[in-house]
Amino acid sequence: MGNFVDFKEIEKQNEYVNKVKLLVNGKGKKAFVYTLGCQQNEADSEKIMGTLNKMGYQITENEKEADVLMVNTCAIRDHAEKRALSIIGRFKHYKAVNPDIIIGVCGCMSAQEHQREKLKHSYHYVDFTFGTGALHRLPEFIYNALNKKKRYFDIDSDKPQIAEGIETLRQSTYRAWVSIMYGCNNFCTYCIVPYVRGRERSRKMEDILCEIRDLVEKGYKDITLLGQNVNSYGKDLDEKTNISALLNEISKIEGDFWIHLMTSHPKDASIEMIEAIKSSPRTSGHFHLPLQSGSDEILKKMNRHYDLERYLSIIAKLRENNENITLTTDLIVGFPGESEEDFNLTLDVIKKVKYDSVFSFIYSPRKGTPAAAMENQIPSEEQHRRYDILCDAQNEISKKINESYIGTAQKVLVDGKSKNNEGVYTSRTQGNKIVHFECEKDYTGQFKTVKITRADTFALYGEII
Ligand code: SAH
Ligand code: SF4
Ligand code: F3S
C-alpha cells in the first residue's frame, strides 16, 4: 500500500481488460493516442497504448479510422494547453459522425480542476478524463464508456500512486524510457507539475533494475531514466537508497548501452552522484542541468534553493577530468520582476558555461502557482525581445562548439532515414548531438562511427567509417 496501487485494484482492472476484450476482440477496432508534453508523457502514452492493445485495440497513427481517441495532455505552458484543446476540438467531428467513438483526455492538463470543469461543460463529447496517477484504471474507463455509462471525470489522481506491471507498447526498439520516480516536491513558484503529478514517489530499485536488464537483453541501446528530479530518487522509500546507488547497480549490468538522466535538480546534485555519473562511460557523455535563471534574486523568487555559485560549482565538478561531457540546460525568460540586469546575468552564464544547447522558454503564468500572482509581470513584447537575444547568443555558441567536432570520429546511434533528405540518415551521439550522414545501408538502431566533416548550429554532418 502507501505509494503503491494494491493487488486487489490491479486484479479488478485485469477483469475489466477481459470484459473489454470480449466486446472488442476480432472486430478490427482501432485506437489513436495523441501525446503532448515531456518524456514522462511519452512514457505514459506507451503504457496507455500497451493497455489499449492488451484490450484488443490495434494502435493506429490515423485518427480518422480510430474507435478510441485519446489525448495525453501537458499543462506546462499556456501554449501546450491551447494545443490540447484544439486537438480535442477536432475530435468533435468524429463523434458527430459516429456516436460510438470513445474520446478520453488524460495527462497533466486534465488533473486541474478548472480544466476538468471546462472539458465537462464545454466539450460534451468527451467521455472521460483522468490524471497521470490513474493511468492503471484505463480499462475501467474504457469499459464504462463502451457500456454508455455516465461521463466520468476522475479526481482520484489527486492522490496518485505507483502501479507496476502495466503493459508497455514501446515506440522504439533501441531507445527506451524508464520512469524511476513520479511527481515532484519542489514547488518552483512558476511550475504546475507538483499540482498535477502529486508528490514524489520512487519505484523500488529491484523493479527498475529488472526493467533495464530486460531492455538490454532485448537489444535496447539508449535508456533514459525519467523523473522530475531524479537526484532525489529513493528519499521516500523504506529501503535506504539513492540515485548514486541506483547508478552503481546499473553499471553492473553487462551490455553496450547508454544511460541518460532526465531531469536533475541542482539543489540535490550531490558530489556522490556526480562521481557516480563520471565513473561510468555509460553515463558520462551528457548531462542536463536546468539553471532557469542566472540571477540569484530571480532564483530565490523561483524557489529553486541554489544560487549561481553553487550551480557553477556542480558544472565545474562535472567537467573536472571529463572535458568531453556535453551540457544542456533549461532557462526561463521574462519571469515576473526580471530586470534587464537579471536577464543579462543569465546571458553571462550561457557565455561562460558554453552549453552545447539550451532549452529556453518564455515564462507562462500557470493558474494557482505563486508566480502567477506576483507583481511586475513582464509584457509579452519584452519577453520576446529577451528570448530572441538569448537564442541568438546561444546559437552562436552551439555553432562554434559543433564546429570543433570537425575532423573527429563520433560513435552514434542511428535513428533512421532523414525526413527531408533522400539517402541521408540521422543519428545521435551519446552527448545528444544530431549527426547526419549519407549511407546506402540502413543501420537503424545500431551503433556506428561517423567522421565529422561539417557542422552548423543544430547538427553535425559526416561520413560513416
Ligand atoms: N523537473 C524539471 C523540469 C520540468 S518542466 C526540472 O526541474 O528541471 C521543463 C522546463 O519547463 C523547466 O525546466 C522550465 O524551464 C520550464 N517551465 C516550467 N514551468 C514553466 C512556466 N510556467 N513557464 C515557462 N516555462 C516553464
Ligand atoms: Fe517544476 Fe521545479 Fe518540480 Fe521541475 S523541480 S517539475 S521545475 S516544480
Ligand atoms: Fe507537461 Fe506534465 Fe511533462 S505538465 S512537461 S507533460 S510533467
Image (cartoon, grey):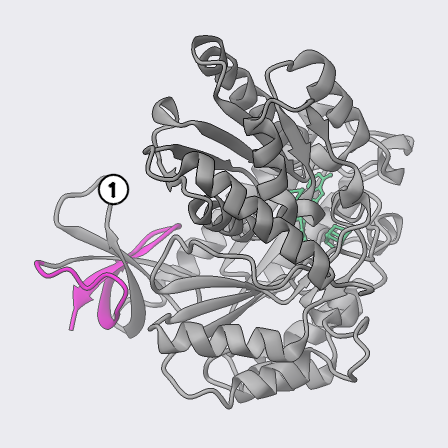
Answer yes or no: is residue 341 visible. Answer: no
**Magenta span of residues:** 440-465
The residue that label 1 is drawn on is 419
For residue 352, which quarter of the picture? Answer: bottom right
Vertical side of 346 occupied by 100: above or below: above
Say how many tags the image has.
1
Image coordinates of residue 428 in percent, x first then y, are 35, 62
Vertical side of 161 occupied by 235: above or below: below
Image coordinates of residue 24 in percent, x first then y, are 42, 35
Left or right, residue 291 beside residue 54: right
Q: Amino acid at mark 1?
A: Lys
The furthest residue to the top:
96
Report the residue at 38% width, 33% height from top.
Answer: 30
Report the residue at 53% width, 53% height from top.
Answer: 43
* Quadrant the N terminus occupies: bottom right
Image coordinates of residue 143 in percent, x first then y, are 57, 35
- Is residue 452 within the magenta segment? yes
Mark 1 CB within 8 Å of ligand 3: no
The furthest residue to the left:
440
Report the residue at 84% width, 51% height from top.
Answer: 187
- In the depicted view, which residue is nearer to us: 403 or 238? 238
Image coordinates of residue 73 in percent, x first then y, are 60, 35
Report the residue at 67% width, 83% height from top.
Answer: 244
Left or right, residue 271 beside residue 88: right
Vertical side of 51 occupied by 376: above or below: above
- In the depicted view, which residue is nearer to us: 298 or 373? 373
- In the depicted view, which residue is nearer to us: 371 or 123? 123
Left or right, residue 186 beside residue 245: right
